[in-house]
Amino acid sequence: MQSAEKIHSAQFLEHQLQEVTTLLEKQQLEKSLVQRGPSTNHELVEAMLQNQHQARLQEKFAHLHPADSAAILESLPLDQRKTAWDAIKNHHDGQILLEVSDAVRQTLISGMAAEELASVASKLNTDEIADLAADLPKRAMLKILRSLNGKERKHLNAILSYQDSQVGALMDFGMITIRNDLTLKAITAYIRKLGKLPSHTDKLFVVDQHDKVQGILPLQRLLTHNPSQLVADAMVTDFVRFQVDQEAAEAARAFERYDLISAPVVDNAGLLQGRLCVDNILDFIREKTDEDLLTQAGVGEEEDLFSSVWKSARNRWGWLLINIATAFASTRIIGFFEDIILQLVALASLMPIIAAMGGNTGNQTSMLIIRSLALGQITPSNIRRLIKKELTLALINGIFIGFIMGLLSLLLYKDIALSAVMATAMLINLLVAVVVGLGIPLLRHKFGKDPAVGTSVILTAITDSMGFFIFLGLASWFLVK
Amino acid sequence: MQSAEKIHSAQFLEHQLQEVTTLLEKQQLEKSLVQRGPSTNHELVEAMLQNQHQARLQEKFAHLHPADSAAILESLPLDQRKTAWDAIKNHHDGQILLEVSDAVRQTLISGMAAEELASVASKLNTDEIADLAADLPKRAMLKILRSLNGKERKHLNAILSYQDSQVGALMDFGMITIRNDLTLKAITAYIRKLGKLPSHTDKLFVVDQHDKVQGILPLQRLLTHNPSQLVADAMVTDFVRFQVDQEAAEAARAFERYDLISAPVVDNAGLLQGRLCVDNILDFIREKTDEDLLTQAGVGEEEDLFSSVWKSARNRWGWLLINIATAFASTRIIGFFEDIILQLVALASLMPIIAAMGGNTGNQTSMLIIRSLALGQITPSNIRRLIKKELTLALINGIFIGFIMGLLSLLLYKDIALSAVMATAMLINLLVAVVVGLGIPLLRHKFGKDPAVGTSVILTAITDSMGFFIFLGLASWFLVK
């Protein structure tokens, strides 16, 4: 490939996708032409065409980085994706399967035999096999386990024993370990003998005979320090390490803060278990972010853009059913006040505003709190100040927005008493919203739950119901006889 | 510091913050005791105490990584933050200012003289000065510019000429360049003479006499290849590079896809301009994610947790005012149907459900589309299939949810005609929601705008108004005489 092409850009990928699509469409067209054509030798011609097309697809994908191949497969509709995958699945080294999203991986794996999967897996590292494990059928997994040696099986089991959110699940085993009583020259010779270092090797791990980590030796020092120096004298002893059962999110923060490329992962006794690298951290951050965004929007899990309508529907119904329930519950409060609405119908058009504004301000508060909790900025020592500040802010916002609301409704309905009720209800509901917007994430955090999950649903349910209740309640007390 | 403490965790940071807070509170207490005590020698005692406290704070922060110091300052309320900063500001090398959030940086810088700022900046690299530039007062910036040499000034101007979203704004100048006609042995000797490599140096950039990038030489190869080999033979010519004016988000995707640590940044002629490293990419991703989340919740920009109430209020009013406007506009439609509500008051309690469910399903669709657009998965060749799929999904959802809604309202009001109107309005509004949820991001993308910005506000405004209009419109047509 011309290196000048390698300025990576969205256009590059779009262009490749377009070419693959053209190939696939041409193939489809030729196939249907043969089938409609004169009936002699159908099968022979079709088989020849098939071979030709597969060769073309293989050639096309052979020039692409596995991550780009993965992106292209993700962007292809199911039938085209299957055709392309059938052509290339035995000509790649398993990296493509690692790079595609979980939802798309299932569509690719479902068409492969256990033997094919086992042969693909044989070219992968154990930490990469672990990434696939959840999606592999049992038979393929057994085959793969049988092909591993004792150490590899131990590694695989280690990774699989941790939850996705733990450091242990993200580690790999591509670490180079050395002893501290050797000279740098000896280490350099050792590396030269190895011939190749695992990717992202920016440092070697110095361990004692029990595999306890004593320090790290940055590659830089190998190049710049005196070759006759001992590892013990050249190594760094003040370094960042992680524990296997630590939260991966914490490790991600540490990679950001300390600008790490790789770091040792240890168990409770300080013994080396594996290595954590910035590429896995980047993937983790992206997945977590996507998951958070989709969960917030009520899409159950990562969706394959082209999965069947039924599958997508099931993925989204959970959330919609919860919303039906809360929407119904909060509007039951309106039902309770129907007499009052009949006496003053303007209430019907004004009440949704009170509810909506409560939801909006509550969301602002809860989002800031959730973010500050994630950053570890909220502590017992500053929480009171924070609550006081947000409440003061709600009071000011309430008076300000209440005033605007009162004014607008006065212009519309020329009814001072109604405007006063509108302004008061707005103020009270904004205070309620802030208390709830602070309370839910703080309480969830206190009890060790993810403060982001479900906060907005509960918040909206409460601000809606309270909004209707406060507004209609005040109206029935002050406005109607 | 004991290396055993260095297992980075949230507890570690919380513990440090607690210690700093205790120091600061003790200082406050002692100060007030002296002021209330017998009146002789007030100033002398106060000054002594002051020195003692500052020394203690300096010692505490001296042991912390700048990123941890920054996190602690961010978590301190304004008055305590000021006290801590006054104690340490002349004893650190500017890294803390780089690590704090924009909002917090302003509170720190506002208390510093131009001379202090210039002296801090003199210890920073030009790309780091560029990060601070936006927050520095003009006088300090002039002082800093005067202290730079010609090359540094050129670098600084280069970075500042790019927008935050472009690769050029994220690059640094810590690259090591070499010629291709030297042996690896000569390069090793050169590095040994340099004594130290910039952080994140995993490869050297091979350039010709015009600074045109010809290849990269991974440090690994220096260690493993034959020392007598020429750079020209050992270098990699198929490598990823970026253009100065490229979107940073695109570069971030490439770092994820290709697991990069550093990469050359070139201009349109292929001449080396700088270097892009994974640490800056990580920071960029985090900032972009935070910004997206906060924008979605309607918090204008990153807020200092402890900024004044007025400042926070102003930061949030913009969004709330927009919401007041859209909420008012959509409820005006209800005002238009007040006669009908008077005839059938059940409509008042049912209408908010139609509106809310429209907003929810529309949001699901738009979030998926926004994400797929960001991943570059949507292309002219697959867009039709996508639209068809989402519309089919909306139809199924509409029938399903409409049915549930109709059933629930039948149970409540025992009115078959009303239930039918409810179900039909739900179906139609879900279809409207999906069209809007697809349409807004796709159109914004088509016209080169960020598809995420503002989508949810416009979407909710439309699904609310249309929800009220469809439901009350159908009701007035079929239900009331």
Image (cartoon, coloured by chain):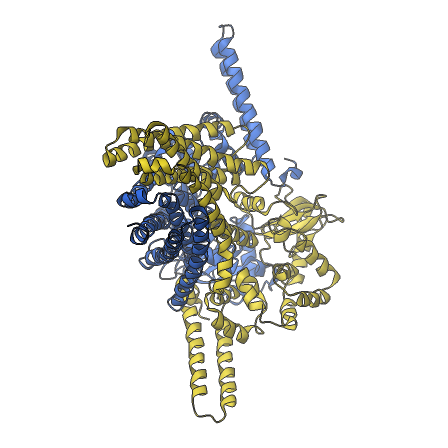
Chain colours: A yellow, B blue
In the displayed structure, does residue B237 sit left or right of residue B425?
A: right
Foreground: B50 or A361?
Answer: A361
Q: Residue at x 63, y 35 (%)?
A: B1
Point out residue B152 in the picture as x, y percentages from the top left corner.
Answer: 39, 45
When the figure is inspected, residue A113 is found, relative to residue A419, above or below; the finding is below
Name the quarter where the C terminus of chain A is drawn.
top left
In the displayed structure, does residue B3 sit left or right of residue B303?
A: right
Evaluate whether residue B344 shows in this view: yes
Foreground: B93 or A101?
Answer: A101
Q: Residue at x 60, y 36 (%)?
A: B12
Point out residue A124 in the picture as x, y percentages from the top left corner.
Answer: 63, 64
Point out residue A286 in the picture as x, y percentages from the top left corner.
Answer: 50, 53
Point out residue A472 in the picture as x, y percentages from the top left corner.
Answer: 37, 34
Foreground: A331 or A284?
Answer: A331
Evaluate whether residue B178 shows in this view: no
Foreground: B345 or A438?
Answer: B345
Report the label total: 0
